[in-house]
Amino acid sequence: MSVQQIGEDIHGWARDLFPVCRSITGPGVRDTLAYLTRLMPGLATHAVPSGTPAFDWTVPDEWTVRDAYIADANGRRVVDFRAHTLHLVGYSEPVDCWLDREALDRHLYSLPDQPDAVPYVTSYYRRHWGFCLTHRQRQALGEGRYRAVVDATLAPGMLNYGELVLPGSDPREVLLSTYICHPSMANNELSGPLVTAAVARWIAALPARRFTYRIVFIPETIGSLVYLSRHLDHLRRHVVAGFNVTCIGDERTYSFLPSRAGDSLADRVARHVLHHIDPDYRRYTWLDRGSDERQYCAPGIDLPVASIMRSKYKDYPEYHTSLDDLQFVTPAGLAGGYAALVAALQVIETNTVPAVSVLGEPQLGRRGLYPTVSIKGSGDAVKTMMDLISYADGNRDLLAIADLLDVPHQDLHAMVQTLAAHGLVTERDAGYRTADGGAAGR
């Protein structure tokens, strides 16, 4: 299947899931996980009870919303959760009351500088209720009395997350983490889990996997804290690289946010891949963090997790508004995000430390590796091959050599396979290290 068709498929999945009201808990999360399980039959869903501690945090009560609206004195709904899930402040407590215009305004949220956008607002850990609307809608509300209804439940329940483990021949792991806790937004929510699902299907279809892949679908922040609190020792012993997958579906740019360490395998791979996809990609620093990398790279946890994105969260005008929709996120944008992640995983899978096995410059001609006819450009590949050989001293991995030569890793990998087939190069394991300093049994 072409990458273009994969982008179309992902966009179709996004159209299916866009209307679902997701939050950090509740039926929207379970419905989303059920949909993802149809895409990835091996995905296991886990439930963690409210009140469960997760380091310094506690799993909150479960939120279930059935309906919510503001109606005027004639019963006409002027703000309606059924029209768009962003109209209700996330985790609003139940209410059914009449208010005058002034009192109602204290529970309304809009964006004067984006008058046609509905903002995304939450109040997870403080009891509150409210509605979000466009600023034009807010200005059009006249004087009079309004009925505010939030038909919802906040009570002890469950936090749910999904986990898919695809074993490889090596116990060392690559972690992919994405979140499933936002309502109807396309780049900041659906692009992450759905591109990850497509990548998981690609991994599952590989005829052979070198590494084990751990893929988790969690509520942001509290979900990663819960997951880490349950699996930290294992992750520190096994994970050699990881990516937090979010905001990966529009066409404007590519972006990179490093791990806290800044020099992990994930950082090196992401920089290499994005450089060859788009040399003008946007480079961020750890100080620009804002998603689950905060938890995965926290002191004492220190997992090697970086982020490959398209337009980064907080840095595009549609962010956390109703403008982050399925027109902003496109099949082509999703396909580009998917291709970037796949390219990164291919580097991790195929990276080795090559070492030339002959002394002096090898004779390529008698092995059929030198062009028999010299024309303009015919020696370029040979020049690259000889440059590769000159750095293949057994001390650098192929990724480092690719960066030195400014050549895509996949091109050098193909050359190494050719040279190895002719007995000119040997390869050894790249020696990826885990967070605890080990090599997961290798």
Image (tube, grey):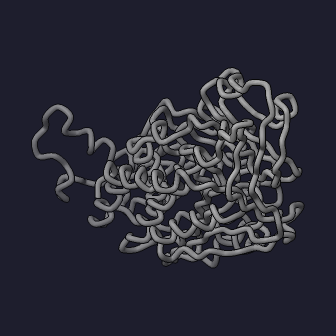
Q: Residue furthest front?
A: 74
Q: Residue at x 70, y 49 (%)?
A: 68
Q: Residue 291, how many percent across, how many down?
A: 70, 48
Residue 432 appearing in the image:
no
Q: Residue 104, how many percent across, how many down?
A: 82, 34
Give the number of callouts.
0
Q: Nearer the viewer, residue 266 or 91?
A: 91
Q: Residue furthest left?
A: 373
- Decide: is 278 above or below 299: above
Residue 310 appearing in the image:
yes
Q: Quadrant of residue 203?
A: bottom left
Q: Residue at x 64, y 56 (%)?
A: 22
Q: Quadrant of residue 440?
A: bottom right
Q: Residue at x 61, y 63 (%)?
A: 217
Q: Residue 393, how many percent across, how many down?
A: 47, 55
Q: Residue 147, how many percent across, how many down?
A: 78, 42
Q: Nearer the viewer, residue 149 or 280?
A: 149
The quadrant of the image that shows the N terminus is bottom left
- Decide: is 210 above or below 253: below
Q: Is residue 334 left or right of residue 104?
A: left
Q: Residue at x 69, y 69 (%)?
A: 160
Q: Nearer the viewer, residue 237 or 88?
A: 88
Q: Is residue 45 left or right of residue 260?
A: left
The quadrant of the image that shows the C terminus is bottom right
